[in-house]
Image (cartoon, grey):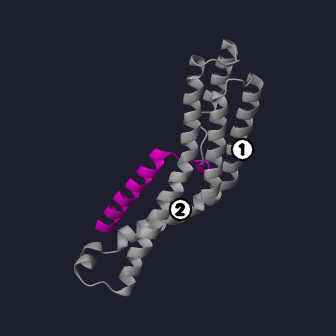
Amino acid sequence: MLIVCTILSLILKDYRKSIKSPGITFEVLQRRHIAVMNTVKRVDKCLSFPVFLLLGSHILLLFFLVAFFNWQTNWKDSRSVLETYYYVVFILYLIQYFVITTFAAKVHNEVQNIKIEAGKMSSRPSQLTAVEQILLIAKINSHSNICLTVWGFLDITKNFVFSSFGALVTFGALFKDL
C-alpha cells in the first residue's frame, strides 16, 4: 500500500514537473494528463476495497482499545504483560493508521499541486497558446478531485486523516462512559 501510494505520488510529481518544461506541446501534456489520471483511477479501483478492509480493521481495533481498556487505573498500578501488550498494540496500530492514511492523502495533495502549477502556467514562457493553456487548465480542473478512496465513498485527504482519528477517539470515549 505504501509503495503504491509513493509510486503514484512520484508519477504525479513527474507530471507536475512536465507542466513546467518550456518546450512541451499541448498534445503531449493532454495525453500525459489523461494517462496519469486514468492510472490514479485504476489504482483506486483496485485498492479501494483492500484499503476499506485495512482501515476498517484498524479503526475497529483502535475503537475497542479506546472504549474498553481502562487507561486511568492501569497507569497508576503496575502493568501486567497483557496490559503492556494492549499499549504496544494500540501504539503500533495508531502508527500504522497514520502512516497508511498520510501516504494515501499524498496522492490528493499532488493532484492539487498539479492544479496550482497549471494555474501558474500563464506567467511563464511556453509553446502553448492562450487557448491551449485555458483548455489544459480546464482539463486539469475537471480532474482536481481525484484521490484514493475508501471503497468509493470516502476520499482520503489530509482532512480525512485527522477527522477520522478525532471521531474515533471521541466516540470511543463516549462509548466507554456509557
> Which numbered tag is attached to residue 56?
2
Callout 2: SS: helix
Residue 47 occupies quadrant: bottom right
Q: Residue furthest top?
A: 130
Going by the image, does 55 lie left or right of 77? right
Q: Which mark is residue 39?
A: 1
Please give the name of the residue rendered at 59% of the width and 62% of the height, measured from the top-left corner. Answer: 53
Q: Amino acid at mark 1?
A: Thr
Residue 1 seen in the current view: no
The vertical placement of 147 against 94, above or below, is above
- Indicate the position of residue 143 as horizontal and vertical percent values: 63, 33
- Give the amino acid at mark 2: Gly
Of discs 2 and 1, which sits in the foreground? 1
Question: Could you classify mark 1 by the number of other residues whose Cα lies within 10 Å: few (under 14), some (14-19), or many (20 or more)?
Answer: some
Does 169 lie within the magenta span?
yes
Q: Earlier in the sequence, mark 2 or mark 1?
A: 1
Q: Which residues are magenta?
A: 149-178
List x then y, in percent, for residue 2: 59, 57
